[in-house]
Amino acid sequence: MVKVGKQAPDFEGKAYHNGDFKNVKLSDYDGKWRIVCFYPGDFTFV
């Protein structure tokens, strides 16, 4: 389980960058500051 203040597990997802989709992993950015934002999708009343 992910907890506030603890290290996030490595994961992979698709990202849209410069007009194209690519696969990225959290570990691709080791040594850099990272902010992970989650958008659940349209029509979900959050």
Image (cartoon, grey):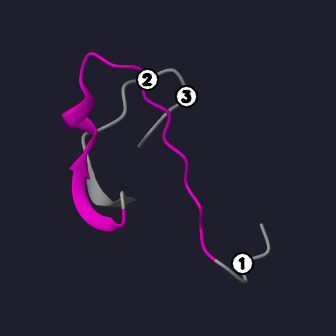
Q: CA distance from mark 1 to mark 2?
A: 28 Å
The residue pinned by badge 1 equals: 44
User: In the drawing, what numbered circle is on residue 16?
Assistant: none
Is 9 drawn above or below residue 45 in the view shown? above
Give the amino acid at mark 2: Lys
Residue furthest out toward the front: 18
Of the image marks 1 and 3, the number of the one nearer the N terminus? 3
Query: Magenta span covers which residues?
Result: 19-41
Q: CA distance from mark 3 to mark 2?
A: 6 Å
Viewer-closest of 15 and 17: 17
Of the image marks 1 and 2, the number of the one nearer the N terminus? 2
The residue pinned by badge 3 equals: 4
Q: Nearer the viewer, mark 1 or mark 2?
A: 1
**9 magenta-colored:** no
**32 magenta-colored:** yes
Picture residue at 72% right of the left edge, 78% below the top? 44
Viewer-closest of 15 and 37: 15
Image side of residue 33 versus residue 39, left or right: left
